[in-house]
């Protein structure tokens, strides 16, 4: 297969461009932060392709950059699969002015949870353990190849998943989007993707945000634990309130540093007073 084989004639995307996305995907964790997580690395991986797609549309390029610098976090190995789908959707957004661009990030959010679960299971729970076990056996025998054995055994599935995931995500994403567009089901697809995305965010809040109240009172000899009543009203109510409060601050353009300082101060006061 030619090194510069044309993959998308409409936007002159070549195999070289996809190799660039593949190699850039290894920088996902290089700029990890708690505001956008892997968002900056995701945008960096797609930048060359986005510039080709929006080569004559500066406004469209800026809007696409804003979309892909948004918060994104998942196991890195299957992430290029999502990148492939994003490329296909950006091509459709450039071609069809009526395309709902909010569906691009909705799809990304919807895939974060499921693919992270699969990726964590295989790469951190299986491949890593097997590679380490075999490498340790080499190291116990004093073999200097032990670290190389570890790197090779772990990275073979890592490289293959990244490369073929990118290609499959782009090809299947393109065909799926074309079918949805021609059948008139794109609006329904976008709506469903939004629901899945919101549900995924809700699951992440319940799983990752751990806030509870130790407050309790004794009335007429009966102990009343506030947290138990809160759970009866809405399970994980405090994490939800905290998340919505932070989201409200972000919507009002409050600086991230100020939000973090506020969380530290409120957490300290509530901890000292025994409220949370």
Image (cartoon, rainbow, N blue to C red):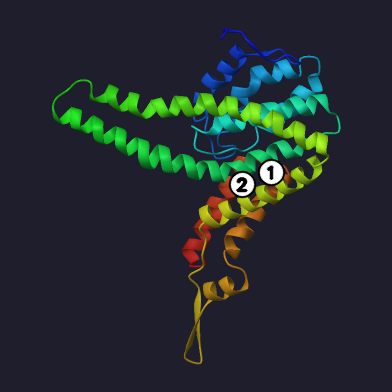
Hey, which residue is sitting farthest bottom in the picture? 220
Residue positioned 56% across, 16% down in the render? 19
* Residue 53 location, quadrant: top right
Of residue 71 and residue 198, the one placed in the foreground of this image is 198
Taking 250 as reference, is 77 left or right?
Answer: left
Check contact, mark 2 vs mark 1: CB within 8 A: yes
> Mark 2 vs mark 1: which is more N-terminal?
1
Q: Residues within 10 Å of mark 2 (few under 14, many from 20)?
A: some
Question: Which residue has dot 1 on it?
Answer: 254
Q: Is residue 30 visible?
A: no
Residue positioned 52% across, 55% down in the render? 207
Q: Is residue 62 above or below residue 55?
A: below
Q: Is residue 24 visible?
A: yes
Expressed as whole percent of the image width and height from the top left, the position of residue 123 reads: 41, 37
**Secondary structure state at the residue bearing disc 1:** loop
**Secondary structure state at the residue bearing disc 2:** helix
Q: Is residue 243 above or below residue 218?
A: above
* Residue 244 location, quadrant: bottom right
Q: Quadrant of the image for the N terminus?
A: top right
Residue positioned 75% across, 43% down in the render? 190
Determine which of the numbered discs, if any, sits on residue 259 in the image.
Answer: 2
Taking 185 as reference, is 23 left or right?
Answer: left
How far apart in space, not on screen, are marks 2 and 1 (Cα)? 7 Å
Of residue 209 and residue 130, the one placed in the foreground of this image is 130
């Amino acid at each position: 297969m030619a090194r510069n084989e044309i993959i998308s004639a409409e936007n002159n995307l070549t195999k070289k461009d996809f190799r660039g996305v593949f190699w850039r995907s290894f920088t996902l964790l290089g700029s990890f932060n708690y505001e956008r997580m892997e968002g900056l690395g995701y945008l960096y991986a797609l930048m060359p392709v986005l510039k080709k797609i929006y080569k004559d549309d500066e406004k469209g390029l800026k809007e696409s950059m804003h979309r892909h610098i948004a918060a994104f976090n998942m196991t890195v190995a299957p992430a290029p699969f999502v990148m492939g789908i994003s490329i296909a959707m950006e091509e459709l957004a450039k071609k069809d002015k009526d395309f709902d661009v909010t569906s691009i990030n909705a799809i990304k959010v919807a895939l974060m949870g499921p693919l992270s679960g699969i990726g964590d299971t295989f790469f951190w729970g299986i491949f890593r353990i097997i590679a380490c076990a075999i490498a340790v056996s080499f190291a116990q025998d004093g073999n200097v190849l032990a670290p190389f054995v570890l790197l090779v055994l772990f990275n073979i599935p890592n490289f293959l998943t990244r490369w073929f995931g990118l290609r499959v995500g782009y090809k299947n994403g393109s065909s799926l989007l074309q079918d949805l567009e021609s059948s008139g089901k794109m609006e329904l697809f976008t709506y469903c993707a939004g629901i899945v995305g919101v549900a995924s965010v809700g699951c992440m809040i319940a799983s990752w945000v751990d806030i509870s109240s130790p407050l309790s009172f004794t009335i007429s000899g009966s102990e009343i634990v506030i947290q138990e009543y809160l759970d009866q009203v809405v399970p994980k109510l405090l994490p939800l309130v905290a998340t919505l409060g932070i989201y409200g601050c972000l919507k009002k353009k409050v600086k991230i540093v100020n939000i973090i300082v506020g969380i530290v101060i409120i957490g300290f006061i509530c901890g000292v007073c025994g409220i949370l």
